[in-house]
Image (cartoon, rainbow, N blue to C red):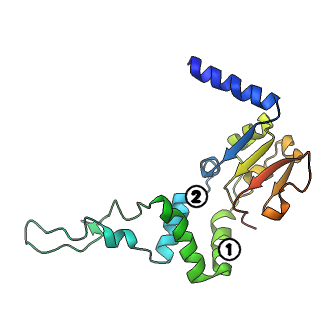
Amino acid sequence: MDKLVKQIEKIREINKQHKLVIFVGAGVSQNSGVCSWWELVKDIAIRIDYNDICEKCKMKNLICSECGETLELCSFDNDECQYKHNYSSDEFLKIPQYFYEEKGEEQYIQLLKEKFGGNYESNEIDNLILDIKPEHIITTNYDHLLEDTKNINVSKYTIIKSDKDLLTETGKHYIIKMHGDKD
């Protein structure tokens, strides 16, 4: 417990020095019902029929102990294969890129709007992050939950959606959307 208290004190000190930057990932938005990165990639993989994992699957060529035939299924007794969507770090980046290349920018943007354009509401973690008042917030999230919060501190932040907007105004606090956003 002492270690945790020391870490909290260290964060407070960094914040007093105006050097605190908070990184926000998909887990924060999931509290509002937004899909995780894994769920998004899985949906994209299904849409483009991505099956590299299935081609390499160790379960693919099992021999049936009863009849001796080779099994070439990605399910067994109507249970979906547990390995089917077990993507590597590289695949989490490549699969959306494959979709973009195969379907084009328009369909890619439409997919992002479909997935992130729902009527989601900011959650308590979004508010707590803004209560801390970090210098900057960096997020990988496409949604608008941080900037749509009713927390009064959000007005102190400039939203950065592309590289060209970065650091255009000095002395400002930023919410930096590393991958842009649904718009």
Q: Is residue 89 above or below residue 101?
A: above
Judging depth in this view, the residue of 86 and 120 nearest the camera is 86
The residue carrying pointer 1 sits among few (fewer than 14), some (14 to 19) or many (20 or more) residues within 10 Å by Cα, namely: some
Q: Is residue 141 above or below residue 104?
A: above
Q: Is residue 108 left or right of residue 15?
A: left
Could you tell me which residue is drawn at 67 percent across and 25 percent down?
Answer: 8
Residue 94 pos. (x, y %): 53, 69
Three-letter amino acid code of the residue under disc 2: Cys
Q: Is residue 175 above or below residue 2?
A: below
In the picture, the quarter occupied by the N terminus is top right
Tell me the residue that label 2 is attached to: 35
Residue 102 pos. (x, y %): 56, 82
Q: Secondary structure at mark 2?
A: loop
Tell me the residue that label 1 is attached to: 109
Residue 91 pos. (x, y %): 48, 65
Could you tell me which residue is drawn at 76 percent across and 30 percent down?
Answer: 14
Q: Is residue 15 above or below residue 95?
A: above
**The quarter of the displayed image where residue 181 is located:** bottom right
Three-letter amino acid code of the residue under disc 1: Ile
